[in-house]
Amino acid sequence: MASPYQMDLISPADDVWSVTKLTTAVKRMIEGEIPQIWVRGEVTGCKTYPSGHCYFTLRDSMCQVRCCLWRRDMGRAGKPPADGTEVYVLVRAGFYEAKGEFQLNVQRILPSSAVGRAQQELERVKAVLHQDGLFDPARKRPMPQFAATLAVVTSTAGAALRDMITVARRRWPSARLLVINARVQGDGAVEALVRGLRLVNRLTGVDVCILGRGGGDREDLAAFNAEAVCRALADVRVPTISAVGHETDISLTDLVADLRAPTPSAAAELALPDQQAIERTLNGLASRLARGLGNRARLGLERVDRAGDRIDAALEAVLDRHRHQLTRLSAQLDALSPLRVLDRGYAVPTDSTGRVLKRRADFAPGAPFNLRVADGEVPARVEPE
Amino acid sequence: MTTIADDLARLEDIVRKLEADDVELDTALALFEEGVARLRAARERLAAADLKVQAVLEEAGGDLRLKDLDA
């Protein structure tokens, strides 16, 4: 049953938005989030109003979107397209609040038949190279650790070569650069680059091949998107670096090469070892070498020390044994000594030469003699007859 | 002809052997001497380095010729 109090469903606490508030929020979201972009689609329902503004719908097989080409933009943007044309439009996303409609504000229109050719060729080449596996990460070869000889395919007139020479001289002065001069833009550039890359395979001792040029307009980089150049690069037998244009430009040779460098200088950095790092490595090895020998010698000395200790201990044991023996022997000797008898009160008579007087005949009447007692000698004389 | 890469690889090898405890003292001395010689050779190689820049030219007959470029 319908309640007369349906309004109760909305509490006073609920925030009720006006249509204007909502559309303003949506407008802000759409216009803030989506940058200026190129969109491709087919034009239908194109109509120019007396105001001078032109409206059309852009669609693909699934979706469609309203587009406005304002009168003030018409001069720069290009002619309103005929229905059924496929176009690229440069747009800013917008939201028309009065009708609550999402729309694209068109800044430029290019029929895809015009753009198309270069872009379509690029896409065709990209597709076919991809199909042939030329972008396959498994194909990528590592750079050698100590490249000594670089083959550089570039224009000898360009800044790219000068930059690479500067980096090489600073980083790895023992390097050799073999420069193959080639046109890098305009008529004949594709053929020149292909010829240059093929020459690389005829050189001996090359460690890395750099294909490079300095930055330029997108048109100027076209040769580096050419199928023939990409295939010739893939056929180079040594690891390759593509260094085309400045950092933001990516070409198909960048995708085919084993390594992509943002600039020619960076390519030289990537290809060549760093002398200063190697000097640091050598210093490290030198101190390890010295320490290694020092340790080994110390180990030897310790072993000698330990052997010495053992010899000392053995000697000590022998001496000990002998010392005991000596002590015992000397005690025995001591006990046997005739002098010990004197302690018990005996005396030994000797003549002036020290001869012991043992018998009566040894004592001549009136003759002097000595009596040896425990603590010394006593002079004595035989009574005269 | 040996290269700086050979020098570095051999030096690394020598140092590792020296750092192991089981090497005989006379072997250790021989390794040390070779290491010092390798170090000196590597340093001389680095010091003597002078960047070489050459243009690759293709002769009319198809032969390749190298010509020094003023770098």
Image (cartoon, rainbow, N blue to C red):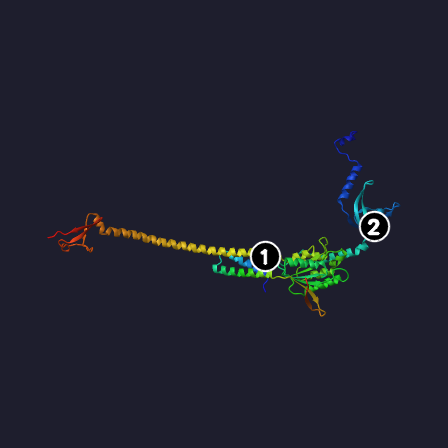
Callout 1: chain: A
Q: Is residue A139 visible?
A: no
Residue at point 34%, 54% (across, down): A319
Per the image, the residue denoted by label 2 is: A76
Which amino acid is tagged 2? Arg
In the image as oriented, which residue stretches furthest toward the left?
A385
Q: Label 1: few (<14), some or many (≥20) within 10 Å?
A: some
Q: Is residue A368 visible?
A: yes
Per the image, the residue denoted by label 1 is: A279
- The percent coordinates of residue A164 (x first, y second) are 68, 58
Q: Nearer the viewer, residue A20 or A271?
A: A271
In the image as oriented, which residue stretches furthest toward the top?
A4
Q: CA distance from mark 1 to mark 2?
A: 60 Å
Callout 2: chain: A
Q: Label 2: few (<14), some or many (≥20) within 10 Å?
A: few
Label 2: element kind:
helix
- The percent coordinates of residue A151 (x first, y second) are 67, 62
